[in-house]
Amino acid sequence: MATEFKKNILCIGAGYVGGPTMSLIAYKCPFYKVTVVDINPERIAEWNSDTLPIYEPGLDEVVRTARGRNLFFSTDIETEIKQADIIFVSVNTPTKTFGAGAGLAADLQYWEKTARQILECADSPKIIVEKSTLPVKTALAMERILTSTDSGIHFEVLSNPEFLAEGTAIKDLENPDRVLIGSSQTEKGLQARDELVEIYANWVPRDRIITSNVWSSELSKLVANAFLAQRISSINAISVLCEETDADVNEVARSIGMDSRIGSRFLNASVGFGGSCFKKDILNLVYLCRNYGLDEVADYWENVVKINEYQKERFVLKMLKSMFNTLAEKRIAIFGFAFKSDTGDTRDSPAIFITKKLVEENADIIITDPKALKNAKKDLEGVEGSIDYQIDPYKAAEKSHAIAILTEWELYRNLDFEKIFQSMNKPAFIFDGRNIVDHQALFEIGFNVYPVGKPALTHFK
Ligand code: NAD
Ligand code: UGA
């Protein structure tokens, strides 16, 4: 069976990155056998079912086409390691919660376990590809583990960080701005690099496949996320000043974004960025800098995270202050719990922080989201207070005192706000943490409207 395929590709870790990335490689390259393994049998069962474990536009179609043809999901990690020529490692690398570096450094335990398991099971040479986001110099540690016995088997470690964003993963994978491959500059390193280039070249134009040394590649991934998050924190910092000065942050963003040196993307002021990676990767960068004694550099990047925390806190305080300094027993409808639109992912979503703070104020919370209610329930398990879930935004808004829009779902732009207003307690408040609704129109309906980075529109004298 295996001989029908040009090569066997394995990916360890069937998460938000491993699943979609490997599905797309299989989809685009029918002559490679692609297997994705995970220690979590439920996740693998879901990948093998009609209800995939993650929601991504376009993913179902890609998986449906390739699964069973040259794409397989399995829990038999040992056998698959033996059969693989190329092994991608795409396990989670969360922020460490214990010991030295707790709260900053990357927790590399899952990653190290895979390295040891590869060493234990492999009986032929392999190319190992770091897909997870890792601190600089991790490839060196990987190499040291893989050469720690005298097995005589050669392992070549490459870095190939993933730049996809959730919600647009399939689009990003099909048409990436670039694919980055870092390798050692030895003959074997360059050979391995070329093998990986050959895979991507099946659908990515050659000039967008760039190569570098391993350390630049590892560092580029952390830096890309740090720069993206920095833009959001920069515009969010300016949003605070806008609220004080009657300037409008959207107008400021449009003006500066038209400068081609600045560019227009990632300048949407918001309730704060969320997701599993921005905060974790910046903190990882901060930890690295501190490790090298570069405290000024570390402080600079740490402030990107601090502004983000400030933006979330500020949002809750604004709600409290504008609703007459008490939220006790007021019904508040949270519109959107996912960390961004077009995903059910809620990891580090601003909605988690904001809901918990509102519960502390004894508010009655009702959460609506088209895709993230299952995860929201898990995130808020054990939180004592009044929290309900409702898929229908109209029902969620009924009898509420306020709506807080926390995710930029397209759905929320086009709701019948006249109908919503009629069903709410008065005075009715709307806090638009994403600046996605028509503030003037809502004000005219009768809402008191609080955008981010723009003057509030209220009916109070
Ligand atoms: P995830 O938690 O969704 O998936 C990781 C998977 O690895 C889990 O299913 C887990 O069970 C599995 N796993 C852990 N240890 C294992 C082991 N020893 N053997 C087999 N499986 C194991 O994480 P993710 O969001 O896919 O992120 C993975 C990596 O990719 C992280 O380093 C992250 O920073 C990076 N990344 C994520 C994104 C994103 O959008 N989520 C984008 C780019 C890069
Ligand atoms: C981000 C990067 O965009 C990817 O390139 C990277 O691969 C990924 O992290 C990763 O390493 O995990 P992702 O977190 O999925 O992708 O989504 P983004 O579109 O970057 O949004 C992140 C957060 O910033 C969301 O909460 C989003 O709502 C927020 N955001 C984004 C803003 O508040 N304003 C903006 O202008 C843009």
Image (cartoon, helix red, strand yellow):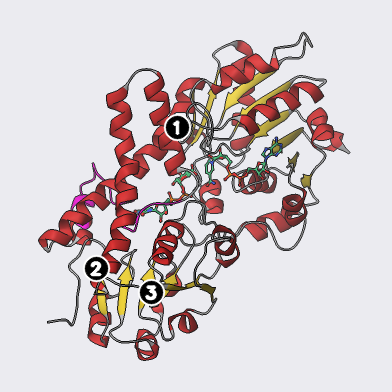
Q: Nearer the viewer, residue 318 or 437?
A: 318
| Label 2, ligand 2: CB separation under 8 Å | no
Vertical comparison of 233 with 151: above or below: below
Residue at the image point whose x is 76% and y is 59% from the top: 49
Magenta-highlighted residues: 254-274
Quadrant in which residue 320 is drawn: bottom left
Mark 1 and mark 2: span between their CA atoms? 35 Å
| Label 3, ligand 2: CB separation under 8 Å | no
Q: Which secondary structure lies at badge 1?
A: helix
Q: Are marks 3 and 2 in contact (CB under 8 Å)?
A: no
Residue at the image point whose x is 36% and y is 43% from the top: 228
Three-letter residue code for mark 2: Lys
Q: Earlier in the sequence, mark 1 or mark 2?
A: 1
Image check: 337 left or right of 60?
A: left
Magenta-span inclusion, residue 94: no
Q: Earlier in the sequence, mark 1 or mark 3?
A: 1
Q: Are marks 1 and 3 in contact (CB under 8 Å)?
A: no
Three-letter residue code for mark 1: Asn
Whole-percent x, y for residue 307 in the image: 29, 46
* Residue where numbered disc 3 is placed: 413
Residue at the image point whose x is 62% and y is 57% from the top: 54
Whole-percent x, y for residue 72 in the image: 78, 46
Q: Which secondary structure lies at badge 2?
A: helix
Name, please, the residue furthest toward the right: 1
Mark 1 and mark 3: span between their CA atoms? 36 Å
Q: Nearer the viewer, residue 375 or 410?
A: 375
* Residue where numbered disc 1 is placed: 284
Q: Answer few, some or many: residues within 10 Å of disc 2's Cα (few below 14, many 20 plus, some between 14 and 19).
A: few
